[in-house]
Amino acid sequence: MSTPALAVSPVDEALAETLPLTRAERRWTFLDVLSVQSGLAIATWAFLFGGTTAQYVGFRDGVLTMLAGNTIGVVILLLALVLPSSKWGTEFFVHQRSVYGPVGALGFVLVVVVVLVFAWAAILATMIGKSAVEIMRIATSSTTADYTWLQSIVAVSMLALAWAILIRGSASVRLLNRFAAPGLLVLCVWLLYAIFSRVSFETLLDAPAIAPNADRATNIMLSVELHIASGISWGSLAANLGRYAHTQRAVVWGSLIAYVPVFVVAASVGLISALVLGSADPVSWMIPITGPVVGVLLLVLLAVANLSSLVGMVQGNCQTLVQHSGARLQRLGWPRFTLVFFIGVAAMVLFASDTLYNRFYTLIAFSEAILAPMCGIALADRLIRRNHVDLRALYDGTSRSAYAYWGRVNWAALIALGAGAAVYLALLNPLAMTGSALFTRISASLPAVVTAFVAQMLLTRVVVMRAGKGAYGQS
């Protein structure tokens, strides 16, 4: 549906890929999905997740909670958000128009994509800049010189390189990660080897959490909750990239392996380094512990890791922005549209990257208050519709669309979302990172998913379907 049979330029094909993909256009194999999603998983955020885990628990509890939390979150993500886009070949938030209406879905784009994706892209670019600073300090034998200017220049330059790769579409993303993903796994294994060459396993096991609460059950659940949020947070990105796979089996297994075991290996580097070295940021300890030659090589690999993640993340999410930005911005075309996006990220790199690092868990928790209920609502909607949608109506944003609801907004779904978010925030305070007594037993994400699921089922059957809205019951 999206790409004409005639030969097109890579730039034209990249823009065409924002439309529904036909079966013939879904060329990614299981290995392609695994490499691209692994390239996303092994990056700055993996180390940050591991370092944040070390705030609450030690090594044993950390690894177990990372595995448990990510498995729960990714399974929910696949069932609720990834498989529908994979089945129909639709961009994620376009598919959500069947649930929230065209204007309702646009609201999620503005909150989830514009705010969060800009923040994540800025974090990745900043980490690449930090790697360059460490290399410069080795080259000049200076540990005290201020190279903030170099960090900014390199970060913005990497954004420009990512844009040059991105404008050629999914083929360039796939090619980059086919080479990058194996190197990134080597990076993680090498980092673990470097740590254990200096620190004994017994020392690691005895290392206490950095800033735990008094109650062990609370600490464990905070770690589990963090990694449930990690799994679900791939959201629209996993859905948009997964639709390139030629089978849903490739999507499920490629994503599951990348976002659970591969991610946990990378996060373990941040966990261990935070527990025994005092920093979850490998940039700060990589050269001192491995030596200048090996350290510089590892920093280059780390920069490649962040570059591959940056390209994949923006590829998936700019498709969302293109389809929801209106005709005037769409006429810019893929190259100019993505250029505007990267300019916005560059501004965030220059003015707000330190703030993003310092409030990492708060950013994750607030996003989870939205994404967890979204998963519950999507699961309920799939069940009621029996996984059928009107593909043509998804691209009809007028009041005549089958998914126009009331004023092009499904208020029932938004009420269900609000109910789920209220439950989440009642159980976990994202600012203070403290949970209620009930939180230690049931987490915050799972009750939010269940609450939104039940509310969506009831409101859809009692209100929406009786009003004849939403094309429920129609293939």
Image (spheres, helix red, strand yellow):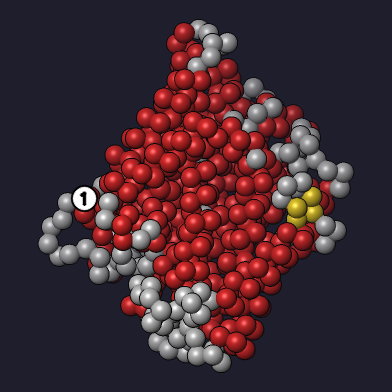
Which sits in the foreground, 318 or 256?
318
Residue, x 30% and y 41% (percent of image)? 165
Crowding near the residue tagged with mark 1, few <14, some 14–19, many ≥20 C-alpha atoms within 10 Å:
some
Q: Quadrant of the N terminus?
A: bottom left
Q: Is residue 36 above or below residue 152?
A: below
- Give the quarter of the image for residue 91: bottom left
- Give the quarter of the image for residue 307: top left
Question: In the rendering, at what x and y percent does residue 233 appear?
Answer: 56, 55
Q: Can residue 146 be spotted in the picture?
A: yes
Question: In the rendering, at what x and y percent does residue 178 appear?
Answer: 34, 45
Q: Is residue 133 above or below residue 163?
A: above
| Residue highlighted by disc 1 | 10
Q: Is residue 386 above or below residue 159?
A: below
Residue, x 75% and y 55% (percent of image)? 428
Residue, x 51% and y 62% (percent of image)? 107
Q: Is residue 225 above or below residue 150?
A: below
Label 1 element class: helix
> Going by the image, does 393 lie left or right of 207?
left
Which sits in the foreground, 137 or 190?
137
